Image (cartoon, rainbow, N blue to C red):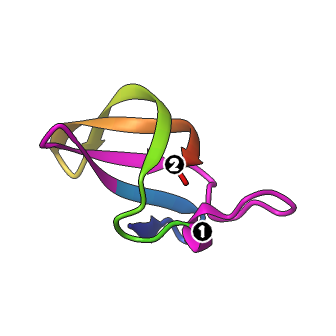
Amino acid sequence: MTTVGKEAKHLKLTVKQDNKIRKTIGWSLCDKTGEINWCKLLKIGDKIDIVFEIDLNEWNGNRELQLTIIDLKKNV
């Protein structure tokens, strides 16, 4: 788990399900005034449920699939 962006407002996660590893991005999930700050709440190894959209990430000439987080919930 890392933060990205000039103000570190975005959450970047690598998630694993059924031995498949995927990169995810959650826009503005670390700067939620009055809402959940996921960057402070999540820890490595936490189990979560994610609602996402599949996107194509193009950066510096590289292209890869990326899951954009729409919503998430920590499993307890």
Furthest-top residue in view?
54
User: Which mark lies nearer to you, 1 or 2?
Assistant: 1
| Residue at screen point 56% across, 68% down | 39
Where residue 17 sits, quadrant-wise, is top left
Residue 4: say if magenta.
no
| Residue matched to label 2 | 26
Furthest-right residue in view?
34
Secondary structure of the residue carrying numbered label 2: strand
Foreground of the two, 62 or 44: 44
Q: Position of residue 72 (x, y in %)?
A: 56, 42
Magenta range is 14-41
Residue 72 visible in rendering? yes
In which quadrant is the C terminus drawn?
bottom right
| Residue matched to label 1 | 41
Secondary structure of the residue carrying numbered label 1: helix
Mark 1 surroundings within 10 Å by alpha-carbon count, few (fewer than 14), some (14 through 19), many (20 or more): few
In which quadrant is the N terminus drawn?
bottom left
Residue type, label 1? Leu
Residue type, label 2? Gly
Q: Position of residue 57 (x, y in %)?
A: 30, 39
In the image, taking residue 16 as reference, residue 48 lies left or right, namely right
In the image, taking residue 49 as reference, residue 63 lies left or right, namely left
Q: Is residue 57 above or below residue 7?
A: above
